[in-house]
Amino acid sequence: MTEFADNVRQAAVAMRALFPATPMQRNAHLSAKYDADIWLKREDLSPVRSYKLRGAFNAMSKRIAENPDQQLFVCASAGNHAQGVAFVCNRLDRKGVIFMPVTTPQQKIDKTKVFGGEHIEVRLVGDYFDDCLRAAQEFCAAEGGQFLPPFDDPDVIEGQATVTMEILDQMPRVPDRIILPVGGGGLSAGARAYLNALNADVHLNFVEPKGGASLTAALEAREPVTLNKVDTFVDGAAVARIGANTFSVLSDTAPQDVLLATEDGVCTTILEMLNIEGIVLEPAGALSIKVLDDLRDEIRGQTVVCVSSGGNFDFERLPEVKERAQRYLGLKKYFILRLPQRPGALKDFLGMLGPDDDIARFEYLKKSARNFGSVLIGIETKSASNFERLFGLMEEAGFVFNDITDDETLVNFVI
């Protein structure tokens, strides 16, 4: 066993004082759906509902071992890393100051305070994470605190590698494939480093949200690069720049082993796992399961582990998740109809709707000409093919309309 693998195992043993190993569960629904042996590594069932406390605990423990007098730890995070640091500060009896953007949902702020108790202080600074990070680092320099990075740190990577160690220990046999999400790369780098240390023959697939593909960009450039724009919907994995330490481990990854999942597509997986399995996943936690669709032919007959990395889902987001999932599946569309201003025109349109078509939105916008008016219409249906029929009837009747479902700017403005 290499030094890295030995350190990972020692870290896992130390973690048992805080929490037991997270469950490894075979999922019958996914196994039948993909004709494979699908298992879930349930990091969403850790004490803070994500794997992040592993890296936080390992890094903090090592800093304390190096300097027992170190009492102040600092981090910048709007989510799972903050909760992990808070939990560990509480258990290791250290003071933590956690910087979070002003725009952080109150639910996440409250949970962080619950995990940290009297040991932590939450400071809300800036509208964006970069402002928050800058303030945290300035505070560290001024107060002599120890900054805990969320992913780009060797000790954090080592801590996150305990996920992979537990997978191999808990599985009845060595899996053919492990699928896990990528944000800053701590979890992924830990998995790659641990498997390399054991020379284990396990195929790794990494999954990024399409709107935050920092590993893909780094592999193309052969070095970490900063994305110009990041879609923050998959907030647990939407990172503008992969870490330097993590990329040094992942730099030889084959591009075809990195998969992208659309934000709307992730919503379908969140709903599927909630409605069928009763499993609550945050968007990042659903990434590894979503790409089973893309790997269907490759994984048939294989033993596959999907890391469900987190379950910190705010149910206030559920209407948005359902909306995005319906649009992704083609079950809901929005269009602007140029409706003739004559008696019976609306009745003619309504008569074209089928028995499974339901009007979810109907809003008169304004008259675009004397004899016509513009109407925003949202239609839900049970089969995507119903829209082919409806649009065909509308065209035959001479109705002029514009499907805006995939126009991100318009949909964000009017929906």
Image (spheres, grey):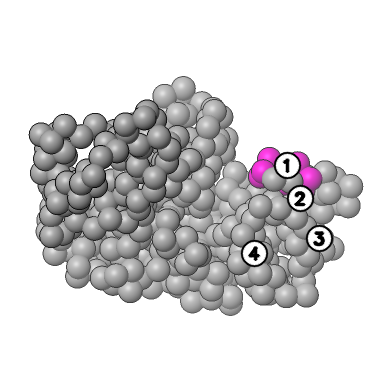
Res 72 label: 3
Res 106 label: 4
Image vertical order of residue 84 relative to residue 99, above or below: below
Mark 4 or 3, which is nearer the eye?
4
- Are circles 1 and 3 on residues that touch, CB within 8 Å? no
Sequence-earlier tag: 2 or 4: 4
Q: Amino acid at mark 3?
A: Leu
Q: Amino acid at mark 1?
A: Asp
Tell me where residue 79 appears, x and y as whole percent: 59, 57
Sequence-earlier tag: 1 or 3: 3
Mark 2 or 3, which is nearer the eye?
2
Task: Say which quadrant the N terminus sits in.
Answer: bottom left
Res 131 label: 1
Tell me where residue 216 appears, x and y as whole percent: 41, 32
- Are circles 1 and 2 on residues that touch, CB within 8 Å? yes
Decide: few, some or many residues near mark 1? Use Cα within 10 Å; few <14, some 14-19, many ≥20: some
Decide: few, some or many residues near mark 4? Use Cα within 10 Å; few <14, some 14-19, many ≥20: few
Sequence-earlier tag: 1 or 2: 2
Q: Which residues are magenta?
A: 128-136
Q: Amino acid at mark 4?
A: Gln
Decide: few, some or many residues near mark 3? Use Cα within 10 Å; few <14, some 14-19, many ≥20: some
Q: Is residue 65 visible?
A: yes
Res 125 label: 2
